């Protein structure tokens, strides 16, 4: 628990989402004065309902594409739909959220002299030709494909962060998040972990896109939030970008088999077409995070999946509105 002199006013944009709500939990528990700002596009208040009565937490329903005027010491920017089905639903809005959202929050950071953090993504590497991916790799993104609204939006946001830093001395932090999962993922977000668990619990077949040989490296949310907070509180000469993710790589088929085993489902693996521009491999090189932040993930996939499955079993899915038809 920080001392009263180190308590800060912190804005979490996108704070009602999957990762944002876990971040709010940590910051509120540390005693900080937390403002959660979210338009609830891909989330719902139930993620933060337990925080609403706390004196050091408040919720503001607002869209980051419009200017924000608040007085804070730190800003975490997580506001952006993250699942392919969500960000492709309204791609122009996705690009606006990344770019205008970054401009509005960076402008606020400049005015308040606040430190500002950007939740960037492994998608800036596109379908990578370097494996595993280090931060110096410049990526292989298709600028006109269906994922570009997200990938290029996040790349432009990184550019804005570094230009505000160089031109206006804004104190920035940028992390590149690799596939992260855990409780409070939206059950209808269409991401692989939520899809497979939801299908397995319903006794349905598991929808494997392509032959399932494509890889991802899955990080449990608690580990990711540790990395975020370490980066925000790290030295001012380390602004990133830094990869934060779990370097243990799995094929999608291996993930499907593990979900079937852990849920005891009798569902079968069925093949569906591979979406356009789906990256064939993804694995973070986390040497930089280890050496500069002393951070590495601790939760193995089997353990994190068991916790996530327990949460999915505990919720009433009929209470979750599907934000888009694309799930
Ligand atoms: P999420 O969809 O659960 O959270 C995003 C939040 O942002 C939601 O609450 C949504 O309502 C809000 N939002 C969207 N557009 C907004 C707008 N215009 N104004 C205000 N709020 C808006 O997804 P998540 O997995 O928690 O992702 C959080 C952040 O981390 C995102 O920026 C995402 O790009 C990044 N990220 C996540 C992952 C991952 O694997 N979870 C990987 C890479 C990057
Ligand atoms: N995927 C799958 N079945 C699903 C959903 C996703 O096989 O029901 C695959 C998808 O094609 C991709 C991987 O799982 O190769 C991860 O997909 P997700 O949408 O979770 O994240 P991203 O592609 O952005 O890493």
Image (cartoon, grey):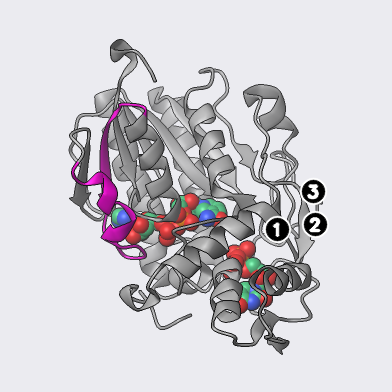
Q: Which residue is mark 2?
A: 129
Tell me the residue at 40%/48% (across/down): 20
Marks 2 and 1, the one that precedes in the sequence:
2
Q: Which residue is mark 3?
A: 132
* Category of crowding for the residue at label 1, using alpha-carbon neighbours closer than 10 angstroms: few (below 14), some (14–19), many (at least 20): some
| Camera sees residue 177 | yes
Tell me the residue at 61%/79% (across/down): 200
Tally of numbered tags = 3
Q: Is residue 200 left or right of residue 20?
A: right
Quadrant that contains the N terminus? top left
| Up/down of 50 relative to 209, above or below | above
Q: Is residue 128 left or right of residue 203?
A: right
Tell me the residue at 73%/70% (across/down): 252
Q: What's drawn in magenta, residue-wise?
A: 30-53
Q: Are marks 2 and 1 in contact (CB under 8 Å)?
A: yes
Q: Nearer the viewer, mark 1 or mark 3?
A: 3
**Kind of element beneath mark 2:** loop
User: Magenta stretch: residue 221 in it?
Assistant: no
Q: Which residue is mark 1?
A: 140
Q: Is residue 115 left or right of residue 207?
A: left
Q: Position of residue 236 (x, y in %)?
A: 51, 18
Q: Position of residue 140 (x, y in %)?
A: 70, 58
Q: Position of residue 91 (x, y in %)?
A: 43, 70
């Amino acid at each position: 628990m920080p001392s009263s002199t180190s308590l800060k006013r912190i804005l979490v944009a996108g704070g009602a989402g999957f990762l944002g709500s876990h971040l709010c939990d940590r910051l509120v528990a540390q005693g900080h004065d937390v403002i959660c700002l979210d338009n609830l596009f891909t989330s719902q208040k139930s993620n933060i309902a337990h925080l609403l009565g706390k004196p050091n937490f408040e919720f503001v329903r607002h869209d980051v594409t419009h200017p924000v005027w608040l007085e804070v010491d730190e800003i975490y920017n997580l506001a952006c739909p993250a699942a392919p089905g969500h960000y492709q639903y309204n791609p122009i809005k996705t690009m606006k959220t990344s770019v205008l959202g970054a401009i509005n929050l960076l402008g606020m950071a400049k005015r308040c002299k606040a430190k500002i953090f950007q939740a960037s993504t492994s998608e800036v590497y596109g379908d990578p030709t370097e494996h595993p991916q280090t931060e110096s790799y410049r990526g292989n993104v298709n600028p006109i494909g269906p994922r570009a609204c997200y990938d290029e939006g996040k790349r432009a946001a990184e550019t804005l962060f570094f230009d505000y830093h160089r031109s206006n001395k804004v104190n920035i932090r940028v992390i590149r998040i690799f596939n992260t999962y855990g409780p409070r993922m939206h059950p209808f977000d269409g991401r692989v972990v939520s899809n497979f668990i939801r299908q397995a619990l319903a006794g349905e077949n598991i929808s494997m896109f392509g032959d399932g040989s494509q890889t991802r490296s899955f990080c449990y949310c608690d580990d990711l939030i540790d990395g975020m907070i370490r980066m925000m509180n790290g030295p001012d000469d380390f602004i990133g970008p830094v990869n934060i993710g779990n370097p243990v790589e799995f094929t999608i088929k291996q993930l499907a088999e593990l979900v079937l085993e852990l849920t005891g489902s009798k569902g079968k693996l069925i093949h569906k077409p591979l979406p356009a521009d789906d990256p064939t491999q993804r694995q973070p090189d986390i040497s930089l995070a280890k050496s500069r932040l002393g951070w590495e993930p601790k939760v193995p996939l089997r353990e994190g999946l068991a916790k996530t499955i327990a949460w999915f079993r505990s919720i009433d899915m009929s209470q979750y509105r599907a934000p888009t038809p694309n799930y």
